[in-house]
Image (cartoon, rainbow, N blue to C red):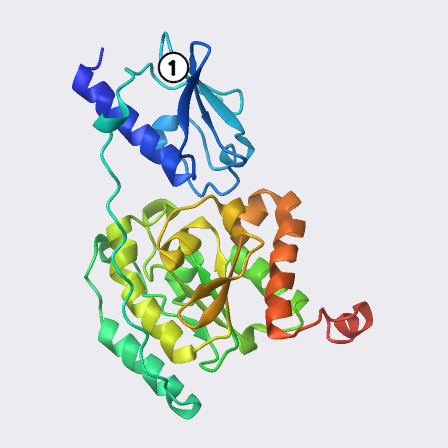
């Protein structure tokens, strides 16, 4: 049986996990403690001790902790975690605040932006600033036109990206290309980058210190490109661009302001591959971005003529 301190540490970790999903209200009702959120499809990961996978996370609606056994119960999760000892809220460690984003850099003229991006890549060098460098094959800097009006930000490289050194070239990248084409654009007309430039082990979510270390270069890329619209792909991108954790559904459907650009939040293409039912919702988000750019989707005839 785990010690009281071990149980408290485990419970704190699980509470932190639910806060990562945007669940902030923990309250008791009729002898049970309920942990609820509107919807949890914003989840990008499930910690190993939760006994669930990413595929299960989107369907979670409301979890219940029995106040007697303090055991987490949810039919959407196939494995019931080990019983825990309930602790008071003040015993749970507070989240560290996000570091302040750097000031927006001076405007780089369009003719000089390609060289400015090359200078940032040179500054990164053979980076060993965080632990992700130990397992990477190639640094994945960014891809696209330096004067793009539209910029996409994802979470981090996967296996295909790590091998090629280019963001979004695997299955999720193919879907992103289709999403861009549906907007009436091509990949050659946009810029694509990630929160971290090295592949996290096992495609896990980047740790905060890894993300904060790497976003200093991402912010410089954004300041050079000066896009009119940024699309944050998934909860991790939205978190580190906006500087706070919030439920993805609460961020979607709104136009946010970020470093002189308008920021739209939508689902990550990898999530859409796991749950294609949400593609329609993602299209609604992209239509907001299109409206901000003054774009209209191509007609069926024009898409057929172009091979779309």
Q: Would you place residue 72 above or below residue 164 in this image?
A: above
Residue 100 lies in what quarter of the image?
Answer: bottom left
Which residue is tagged 1? 71
Residue sitting at x 44%, y 29%: 52
Between 232 and 80, which is closer to the camera in this rendering?
232
Callout 1: SS = loop
Q: Is residue 40 visible?
A: yes
Q: Nearer the viewer, residue 50 or 24?
A: 24
Percent x, y of residue 185: 63, 73
Quadrant position of the N terminus in the picture: top left
Residue at the image position 46 percent from the left and 10 percent from the top = 30
> Residue 202 location in percent, x, y?
36, 45
* Residue farthest toward the right in the current orientation of the protein: 301
Residue closer to the observer: 308 or 151? 151
Q: Note whether residue 77 is visible.
A: no
Q: Position of residue 196 (x, y in %)?
A: 34, 59
Residue at x-position 27% and y-position 28%: 12
Residue 259: x and y in percent read 39, 70
Q: Residue at x 39, y 26 (%)?
A: 26
37 left or right, relative to 142:
right
């Amino acid at each position: 049986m785990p010690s009281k301190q071990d149980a408290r540490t485990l419970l704190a970790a699980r509470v932190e996990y639910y806060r990562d999903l945007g669940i902030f209200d923990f309250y008791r009702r009729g002898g049970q403690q309920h942990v609820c959120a509107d919807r949890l499809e914003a989840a990008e990961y499930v910690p190993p001790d939760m006994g669930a996978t990413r595929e299960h996370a989107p369907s979670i609606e409301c979890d219940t902790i029995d106040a007697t056994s303090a055991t987490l119960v949810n039919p959407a999760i196939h494995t019931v975690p080990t019983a825990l000892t309930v602790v008071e809220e003040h015993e749970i460690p507070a989240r560290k605040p996000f570091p302040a984003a750097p000031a927006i850099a001076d405007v780089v003229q369009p003719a000089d932006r390609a060289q400015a991006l090359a200078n940032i890549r040179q500054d990164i060098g053979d980076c060993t600033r965080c632990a992700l460098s130990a397992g990477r094959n190639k640094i994945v800097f960014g891809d696209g036109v330096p004067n793009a009006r539209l910029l996409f930000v994802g979470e981090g490289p996967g296996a295909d990206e790590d091998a090629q050194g280019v963001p979004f070239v695997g299955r999720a990248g193919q879907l992103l290309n289709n999403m861009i084409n549906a907007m009436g654009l091509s990949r050659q007309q946009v810029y694509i980058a990630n929160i971290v430039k090295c592949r996290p082990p096992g495609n896990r979510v980047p740790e905060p210190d890894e993300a904060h270390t790497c976003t200093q270069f991402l912010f410089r890329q954004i300041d050079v490109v000066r896009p009119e619209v940024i699309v944050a792909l998934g909860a991790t991108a939205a978190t580190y661009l906006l500087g706070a954790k919030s439920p993805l559904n609460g961020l979607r459907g709104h136009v946010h302001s970020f470093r002189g650009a308008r920021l739209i939040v939508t689902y990550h293409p990898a999530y859409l591959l796991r749950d294609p039912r949400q593609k329609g919702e993602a299209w609604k988000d992209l239509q907001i971005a299109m409206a901000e750019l003054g774009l209209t989707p191509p007609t069926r005839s024009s898409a057929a003529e172009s091979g779309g």
